[in-house]
Structures are given as C-alpha cells and as structure tokens.
Image (spheres, rainbow, N blue to C red):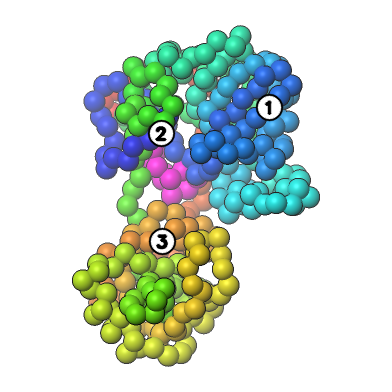
C-alpha cells in the first residue's frame, strides 16, 4: 500500500491513525530459514541490515510476511543519516554499523500469518488485531522487531501529529474497511506539516549550460557565527529567473560560506554541477522543506518569498533544531488488546 498526500487529518468515521516514522519502508518475508527484506521499490535490503535478518530468523514462527519501517535509533532518537550510512558496498562497514547502531523494524501490518494464510483480502479492522496478537506472542520485549502504535481516536492522532519533527515526520491514516492494496493509494493517506525556514543566500549555481540561474545555495549561522551551507532551492518561477540572476550577480564575491561550504559531490546533488559562485551575505529567503538532518535539508527546498525585512544574522539553526523526542518510547509499550472505538476528540 502507498500513501496519498493530503493537507489535513481525515476526521470522518472509519479511519485508523498511526505515526509516520522517519525511515525506510520495508516488507519482511520469512519462509522457514529464508528471510528476505525488500524495499517498496522491490529492491533487496537484507545485506544492509543483517541484524534485522537475524532478529526475524530468531522469531519462533517459521512463516510470515510483515510490512513496516526500518529505523536507526541513537540515544533514544531516530537518526536518518545513520540509516543512510547502511547503503554501502563494503560488507565490513555494514557489519560494523549494525553492531554500533543496530536498526529496528517497526511493524504496522501483517500480510501473512504464521500458518501461511494470506491476510491481504481482510480489511484493516481485522488485520490490525491479528498483528497485535502476533506481536504479543512473538515479538521479544525491547527486541529489534517492534509494533508501531495505532489508534482510532482522533484525539490521539492529533497528539501524534503535534509531535511531528522528532522521530516522526507526519501522520498516516488508513481506511479500516479496506483490504491491503499493493501499490494502491486509495486506502491510505499521509499528512505532513509544512515547515519553513529563513535562510541566507550564500551562493548560487548557474544552470547546466551556464546561461541562466540554476539554484540558490542556502546557509544558516552556527553558534560560532559561521555561515554553514545547508542546501539549495531551485523552484524559482521561470519568468523570474532572469531577474533573480541579475540580483545575485550584483552580490557576487566573498565571503560566501564561512563555515561548511558546498564542495565535492554529495548523496543529495543528483549529478548536478558542483561549481558555485559565492555571494556577500545580504539576501534572505524563506523556503519550505520536508526534512532537516545531518546539518542540512535532506532534499531541495521550495522557494516561498524574499525576506528583505529579515537581518541575515537572524538566520540561525535555532529556528529548525528539533527538540528532544520521546516518540520512540511508544515502541516500548505493550500492544493494546484491541483498538478503541474512535472518539471525536
């Protein structure tokens, strides 16, 4: 099942709510001694997470299929950058990281039970209790395989949504009367808040052919007063690009980024040129982003507006730093025996 993005939490009866974890979607299959982990793009994941393969093999049922999310907790908080470190060709590195920072599989659906019976045609209202029973019987307490919480109470959904920005990056809502639909987007929606940040434009890149503006490079000041490169925005309207290019070319020159600066290729640049032009730090833009981790925006941001009213020195990491999260504590609670009827909360 795939989630369709919506702007607001659905409130009509018939929905089940779950936190949206910040990790890799994963299907886990066990058939006797064979264990397979598979991404939603049907790519094998088992070699990157040997500790999860072993944890699934250690469960007493010899057959099952689970749907969940792979996450890496570090000091009680999920770390997406550490998760990305696992996708590496060197087995020695993977083995070391699996010991230093072992992953969890957070399970939110049961697709085949321990008898080998497929549950795909059952509605969520029947699959979820079966999953909870399966978890109570077979998931070791505080082990590598955990049950994701779920609720039919709108008040609980709103509490989870209010914690977005810690270990969760949104909320999932599923139709309780719907069967499991591989690849379908009709029975599940995701709700993610819009986050914005004011950033200094510390540089820019020309387009691939060098004739127009490619992207603006964004910076935030650290505690030492240095301007760190944190990402880029390239969603400027085509009709505005020539004017924006003229604006930034007038400011071309040092210092640009005085802390971490754009350098060689990164996992984020998607093959774009690494050549960039430094700017004097006087322009501030407001951008919209989805994730911030490892000191930078995980993906490209969306340009919203110029902020001539904002002093560049005000653009610090404080505006987007995530507070300490307690969301992972939800995974340590024993599964409830049944979902309560939805409250209008």
Q: Is residue 330 magenta?
A: no
Which span of residues is magenta-colored?
A: 159-172
Q: Secondary structure at mark 1?
A: strand
* Quarter of the figure that contains the N terminus: top left
* Gap in angstroms between the C-alphas marked 3 and 2: 22 Å
- Residue denoted by label 3: 300
Front residue of 178/73: it is 178
The furthest residue to the front: 209
- Crowdedness near tag 3: few (<14), some (14–19) or many (≥20) residues, C-alpha within 10 Å: some
What residue is shown at x 41% (from left), y 73% (from top)?
208
Front residue of 12/39: it is 39
What residue is shown at x 62% (from left), y 37% (from top)?
44
* Position of residue 332 in the picture relative to residue 228 (left or right): right
Residue 110 seen anywhere in this rendered image of the structure: yes
Q: Is residue 114 above or below residue 277?
A: above
Whether label 1 touches label 2, CB < 8 Å: no
Q: Is residue 204 above or below residue 19?
A: below
The furthest residue to the left: 239
Tell how many labels.
3
Front residue of 63/171: it is 63
- N-terminal label among 1 and 3: 1
Q: Secondary structure at mark 3?
A: loop
Residue 185: give x, y in percent of width and height.
35, 32
* Mark seen at residue 2: 2
- N-terminal label among 1 and 2: 2
Residue 326 seen anywhere in this rendered image of the structure: no
- Residue denoted by label 1: 35
Q: Quadrant of residue 17?
A: top left
């Amino acid at each position: 099942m795939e989630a369709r993005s919506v702007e607001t939490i659905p409130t009509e009866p018939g929905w089940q709510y779950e936190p949206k974890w910040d990790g890799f979607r994963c299907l886990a299959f066990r058939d006797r001694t064979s264990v397979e982990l598979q991404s939603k793009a049907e790519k094998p994941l088992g070699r990157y997470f040997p500790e999860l393969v072993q944890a699934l093999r250690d469960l007493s049922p010899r057959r099952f299929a689970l749907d969940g999310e792979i996450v890496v907790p570090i000091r009680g908080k999920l770390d997406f950058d550490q998760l990305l470190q696992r996708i590496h060709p060197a087995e020695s590195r993977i083995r070391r990281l699996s010991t230093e920072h072992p992953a969890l599989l957070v399970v939110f659906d049961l697709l085949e039970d321990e008898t080998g019976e497929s549950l795909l045609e059952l509605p969520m209202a029947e699959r979820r209790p079966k999953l909870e029973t399966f978890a109570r019987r077979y998931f070791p307490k505080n082990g590598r395989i955990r049950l994701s919480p779920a609720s039919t109470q709108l008040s609980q959904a709103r509490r989870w949504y209010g914690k977005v920005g810690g270990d969760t990056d949104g909320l999932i809502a599923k139709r309780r009367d719907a069967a499991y639909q591989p690849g379908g987007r009709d029975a599940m929606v995701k709700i993610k808040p819009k986050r914005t940040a004011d950033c200094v434009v510390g540089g820019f890149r020309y387009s691939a052919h060098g004739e127009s503006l490619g992207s603006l490079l964004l910076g935030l000041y650290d505690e030492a007063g240095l301007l760190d490169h944190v990402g880029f925005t390239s969603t400027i309207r085509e009709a505005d690009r020539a004017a924006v290019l003229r604006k930034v070319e007038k400011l071309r020159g040092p210092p640009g980024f005085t802390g971490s600066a754009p350098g060689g290729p990164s996992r984020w640049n998607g093959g774009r040129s690494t050549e960039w032009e430094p700017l004097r730090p006087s322009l501030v833009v407001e951008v919209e982003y989805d994730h911030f981790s490892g000191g930078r925006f995980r993906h490209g941001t969306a340009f919203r507006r110029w902020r001539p009213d904002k002093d560049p020195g005000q653009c610090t990491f404080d505006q987007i730093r995530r507070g300490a999260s307690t969301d992972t504590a939800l995974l340590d609670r024993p599964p409830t025996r049944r979902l309560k009827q939805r409250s209008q909360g």
